[in-house]
Image (cartoon, rainbow, N blue to C red):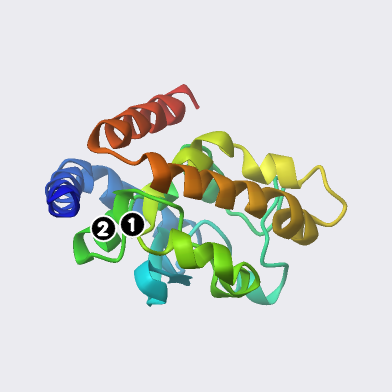
């Protein structure tokens, strides 16, 4: 029953959010297009519930072909990030298209952040637990690693730091969420996320 209620909440809230935020999303799409005429959206393969892969949607914040001219991990000050992209990343506005993923059933509003297949393979046993639920737009890790790019910039090898330091902590937080999840806790996480975004 709780799973049905959570899915119902996801559908209603994502539909309402898409309706209310559609003018903002349209404005963002126009600004991205005007800046360099490249595609507005960027789709990344992520691993979803029960290890089913899906295409996670984001507003494009980097130059076209960024994955071919630099590392997979993005750190603060990365020259591949566009001017509008810097603003979108700061206020997490690049994540808004994931409301479509929620509506489709790929994701939930609140849940463990979806991870890249290559990292899931490394921590497969942990994800056997985590991927029993739908990944989400926000969770404990989103709140704790609000400035993840800045944190990674402090390491000589950001890729290694993500794999050996940050991701294990994210996994710990994901398991904590699964153990503690409830409708009330989801609402608290949503409110804290909104406050975090507004505060910049």
Q: Are marks 1 and 2 in contact (CB under 8 Å)?
A: yes
Which picture quadrant has residue 189?
Answer: top left
Give the vertical position of 188 relative to 73 (above or below).
above
Residue at 51% across / 65% down in the picture? 127
**Foreground of the two, 154 or 136:** 136
Residue at 44% across / 52% down in the picture? 112
Residue furthest toward the right?
156
Within 10 Å of disc 1 (Cα), the crowding (few <14, some 14-19, many 20+) is many
Give the vertical position of 13 relative to 161 (above or below).
above
In percent of width and height, residue 124 lies at 57, 71
In percent of width and height, residue 55 lies at 39, 73
**Foreground of the two, 35 or 174:** 174
**Foreground of the two, 157 or 21:** 157
> What residue does disc 2 label?
102
Can residue 40 be seen in the rendering of this structure? Answer: no
Label 1 to label 2: alpha-carbon separation: 6 Å
Can residue 119 be seen in the rendering of this structure? Answer: yes
> What residue does disc 1 label?
98
Side of 57 relative to 36 (left or right): left
In percent of width and height, residue 185 lies at 32, 33
- Residue 116: assigned label: none
Side of 105 relative to 125 (left or right): left
Within 10 Å of disc 2 (Cα), the crowding (few <14, some 14-19, many 20+) is many
Residue at 57% across / 47% down in the picture? 172
Label 2's element?
helix
Residue at 67% across / 56% down in the picture? 74
Label 1's element?
helix
Side of 60 relative to 12 (left or right): right
């Amino acid at each position: 029953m709780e799973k049905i209620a959570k899915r119902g909440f996801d559908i209603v809230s994502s539909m309402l959010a898409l309706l209310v935020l559609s003018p903002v999303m349209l404005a963002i799409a126009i600004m991205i297009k005007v800046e360099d005429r490249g595609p507005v959206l960027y789709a990344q393969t992520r691993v979803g519930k029960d290890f089913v892969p899906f295409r996670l949607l984001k507003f494009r914040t980097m130059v076209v072909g960024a994955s071919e001219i630099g590392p997979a991990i993005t750190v603060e000050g990365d020259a591949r990030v566009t001017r509008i992209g810097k603003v979108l990343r700061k206020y997490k506005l690049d994540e808004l298209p994931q409301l479509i993923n929620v509506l489709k059933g790929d994701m939930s509003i609140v849940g463990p952040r979806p991870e890249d297949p290559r990292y899931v393979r490394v921590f497969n046993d942990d994800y056997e637990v985590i991927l029993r639920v739908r990944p989400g737009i926000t969770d404990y890790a989103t709140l704790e690693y609000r400035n993840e790019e800045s944190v990674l910039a402090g390491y000589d090898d950001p890729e290694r730091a993500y794999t050996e330091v940050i991701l294990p902590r994210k996994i710990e937080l994901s398991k904590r969420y699964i153990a503690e999840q409830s409708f009330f806790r989801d609402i608290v996480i949503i409110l804290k996320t909104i406050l975090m975004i507004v505060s910049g």
